[in-house]
């Protein structure tokens, strides 16, 4: 049975779609698609059923990734359905933990806690004033964090096998 990852930002139109695309790409490159699934969602439904913003799509395309999913709002069942729920910033993690069922709170983490320095752990999903430059930083942080998470998981699997 596959482990399920959910990337969450405020609107599911910038950071969480980039994080989803990056994690899916890393999983595929590691030939681990059989044991991982990744999705993204929003805390609020501002952009529900719309495609991701054009600029994040371009950043993904520039790295050879195609992202065709539409934005969706997180639903209550997601807390039960996903094994790992990653917020892109501390405020999102705080909100997710506040509304999550008690038995699901430990599934919620800050994606940037993997592989990024404490002062760099926020993957900012606010307005990107510097356009593509800010989005490239979001992409780079997602790549580092997703890679670190998957590497940690792979180490754990190896320990269990040994």
Image: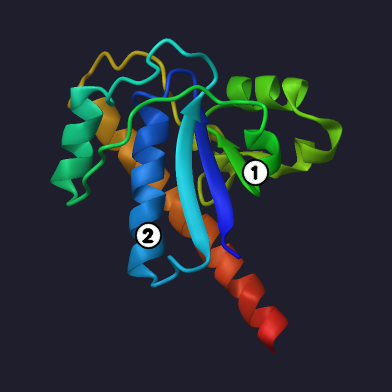
Element under disc 2: helix
Closest to the camera, between mark 1 and mark 2, is: 1
**Which quarter of the rendering shows the N terminus?**
bottom right
Q: Residue at x 56, y 71 (%)?
A: 154
Residue 111 in the image: x percent, y percent?
54, 41
Percent of width and height locating residue 153: 59, 65
Q: Contact (CB < 8 A) between labels 1 and 2?
A: no
How many angstroms separate mark 1 from mark 2 (CA)?
Answer: 22 Å
Q: Residues within 10 Å of mark 2 (few under 14, many from 20)?
A: some
Picture quadrant where residue 71 is located: top left
Q: Residue at x 37, y 59 (%)?
A: 26
Q: Is residue 51 above or below residue 27?
A: above
Q: Label 1 belongs to which residue? A: 81
Query: Which residue is at the front of the view, 125 or 101?
Result: 101
Q: Quadrant of residue 15?
A: top left
Q: Nearer the viewer, residue 160 or 50?
A: 50
**Left-right relation of 82 to 8:** right
* Point 18% across, 24% down: residue: 54
Q: Visible in this render: residue 39?
A: yes
Pointer 2: what residue?
A: 26
Q: How many marks?
A: 2
Residue 18 at x, y percent in the picture: 34, 37
Q: Residue furthest bottom?
A: 162
- The x and y percentages for residue 60 are 22, 41
């Amino acid at each position: 049975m596959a482990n399920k990852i959910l990337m969450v930002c405020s609107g599911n139109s910038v950071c969480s779609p980039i994080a989803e695309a990056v994690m899916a790409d890393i999983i595929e490159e590691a030939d681990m698609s059989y044991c991982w699934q990744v999705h993204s969602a929003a805390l609020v439904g501002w952009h529900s059923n719309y495609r991701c913003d054009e600029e994040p799509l371009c950043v993904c395309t520039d790295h050879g990734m195609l992202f065709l999913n539409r934005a969706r709002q997180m639903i209550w069942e997601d807390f039960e359905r996903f094994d790992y729920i990653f917020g892109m910033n501390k405020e999102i993690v705080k909100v997710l933990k506040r509304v999550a069922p008690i038995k699901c709170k430990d599934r919620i983490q800050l994606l940037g806690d993997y592989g990024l320095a404490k002062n760099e752990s926020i993957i900012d999903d606010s307005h990107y004033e510097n356009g593509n430059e800010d989005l490239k930083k979001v992409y780079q942080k997602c790549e580092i964090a997703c890679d670190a998470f998957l590497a940690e998981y792979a180490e754990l699997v190896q320990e269990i096998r040994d």
